[in-house]
């Protein structure tokens, strides 16, 4: 047996954007537990606690082997008292009592189900729970007024909660590619989000669209959406126009973290024939089987960026969410810069820093380039 003094402690840099986080995870039991507590905190509007658990989980994801002893964690960043207690519980007892009781709690289960409806956030879910609504049937029976997004979300709940496969993402890439080509032949489209990071499944499919000639991207989104609608490909869509130059931002002002690109949150109607391997939705009492319907609903996000901001948009929409948050924290705390999905701003010099590739942005931030597949923090 190896005694404690022979256990080599791991060493990990403190910002997730300084680390290479692949999809390989040697500590899945620990990180699943911490992620569940993060999710519970986020659903309870306790974002600070949520981030703390997310950072702790990300540190464990970055380790080269499984943690077996608490002594191995000595000196690691981002592991607070609470996270260490959870880890210790799991290493010593096989499970964390806090995680188990959270998982089984009626409130957590209800929050998960209700926020699983597209268009429903934690505040709405919390209000419904206080009114005694804990599941979809109670919601349907309650006579609550639902907005258009929530109606679509409830209608397509079973499809949307079903993970999107890479084959389905590629099929949608083909469809959106043809749509873009027909409304703006020069425009370019990139798959972003989790699929760009090499994930094999996702909760949606994310695309970034741009045009090589600055300004020619204006008006592209409405044309694209009309084309898709005319083909009967959209079950729901809501387009938000670009507001980057309208608010407090724009040239001469430091950017905020919120991005203001023209975007379209949608639900696609994906036909079985389009993926070549049939739809993957499960048969349920509430909806006809995939075989009867021959299509499934898939969440798709479309974002349009001017070419001058493309590198920032690409970096910002590739994720993971924690990796993005850590990039912005690094920029602000270590470099005196503000990073958004539109721009990089040097606070001391009072000027924007241009970049035309992700590599340039990392270089401006004084960071080693981390490729998309290693941003799975
Ligand atoms: N994003 C954003 N603003 C939003 C929503 C998302 O900037 N209002 C960014 C996120 O920071 C992330 C990317 O868009 O970098 C993709 O977000 P999302 O689809 O939610 O997550 P994925 O990483 O793609 O995970 P999944 O596979 O579950 O879709
Ligand atoms: Mn490894
Ligand atoms: Mn996504
Ligand atoms: Mn998305």
Image (cartoon, rainbow, N blue to C red):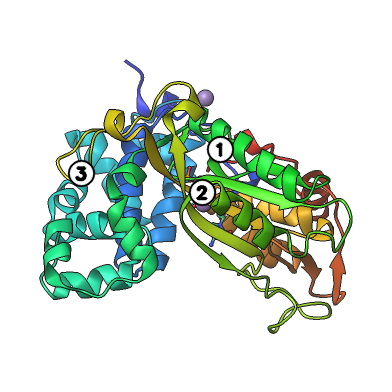
- Disc 1 and disc 3: Cα gap in Å? 40 Å
Camera-side residue of 355 and 292: 292
Q: In the displayed structure, would residue 251 be above or below residue 277?
A: below
Residue 198 in which image quadrant = top right
- Mark 2 in CB contact with mark 1 (< 8 angstroms): yes
Which x, y percent locates residue 148?
38, 67
Camera-side residue of 94 and 369: 369
Can you identify the residue that label 3 sits on? 96
User: Callout 2: few (<14), some (14-19), or many (20+) C-alpha neighbours within 10 Å?
Assistant: many
SS at badge 2: strand
User: Callout 1: few (<14), some (14-19), or many (20+) C-alpha neighbours within 10 Å?
Assistant: many
- Mark 3 in CB contact with mark 2 (< 8 angstroms): no
Camera-side residue of 193 and 180: 180
Q: In the displayed structure, would residue 319 be above or below residue 119?
A: above
Which x, y percent locates residue 169?
53, 35
Q: Which mark is residue 300?
A: 2
Which x, y percent locates residue 97?
16, 47
Can you identify the residue that label 1 sits on? 172
With 60 as the anchor, is 185 left or right in this view?
right
Q: Earlier in the sequence, mark 1 or mark 3?
A: 3
- Disc 3 and disc 2: Cα gap in Å? 36 Å
> Foreground mark, 1 or 3?
1
Question: In the rendered image, is residue 14 in sight?
Answer: no
- Disc 2 and disc 1: Cα gap in Å? 9 Å
Which residue is drawn at the image coordinates 75% and 41% (left, top)?
A: 369
């Amino acid at each position: 047996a190896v005694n404690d003094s022979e256990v080599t402690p791991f060493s990990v840099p403190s910002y997730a954007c300084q680390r290479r986080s692949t999809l390989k995870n040697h500590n899945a039991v620990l990180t699943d537990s911490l992620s569940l507590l993060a999710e519970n905190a986020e659903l309870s509007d306790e974002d600070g606690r949520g981030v703390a658990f997310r950072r702790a989980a990300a540190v464990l994801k970055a380790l080269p082997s499984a943690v077996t002893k608490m002594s191995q964690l000595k000196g690691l960043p981002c592991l607070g008292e609470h996270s260490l207690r959870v880890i210790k519980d799991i290493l010593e007892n096989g499970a964390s009592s806090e995680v188990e009781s959270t998982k089984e709690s009626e409130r957590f289960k209800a929050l998960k189900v209700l926020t699983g409806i597209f268009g429903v956030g934690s505040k709405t879910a919390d209000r419904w729970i206080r009114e005694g609504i804990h599941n979809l049937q109670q919601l349907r029976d309650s006579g609550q007024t639902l907005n258009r997004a929530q109606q679509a979300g409830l209608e397509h709940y079973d499809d949307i909660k079903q993970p999107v496969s890479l084959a389905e993402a590629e099929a949608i890439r083909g469809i959106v590619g043809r749509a873009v080509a027909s409304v703006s032949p020069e425009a370019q489209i990139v798959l972003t989000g989790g699929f760009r990071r090499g994930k094999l499944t996702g909760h949606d499919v994310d695309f970034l669209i741009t045009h090589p000639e600055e300004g020619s991207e204006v008006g592209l989104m409405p044309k694209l959406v009309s084309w898709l609608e005319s083909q009967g490909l959209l079950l729901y869509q809501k387009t938000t126009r670009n507001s980057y130059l309208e608010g407090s931002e724009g040239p001469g002002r430091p950017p905020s973290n919120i991005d203001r690109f023209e975007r379209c949150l949608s639900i696609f109607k994906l036909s079985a024939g389009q993926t070549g391997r049939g739809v993957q939705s499960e048969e349920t009492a509430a909806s006809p089987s995939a075989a009867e319907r021959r299509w499934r609903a898939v969440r798709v996000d479309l974002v349009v960026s001017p070419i001058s901001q493309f590198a920032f948009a690409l970096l910002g929409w590739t994720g993971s969410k924690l990796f993005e948050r850590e990039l912005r924290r690094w920029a602000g705390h270590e470099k005196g810069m503000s990073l958004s999905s539109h721009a990089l701003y040097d606070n001391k010099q009072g000027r924007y820093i241009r970049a035309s590739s992700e590599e340039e942005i990392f270089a401006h931030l004084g960071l080693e380039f981390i490729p998309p597949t290693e941003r799975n923090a």
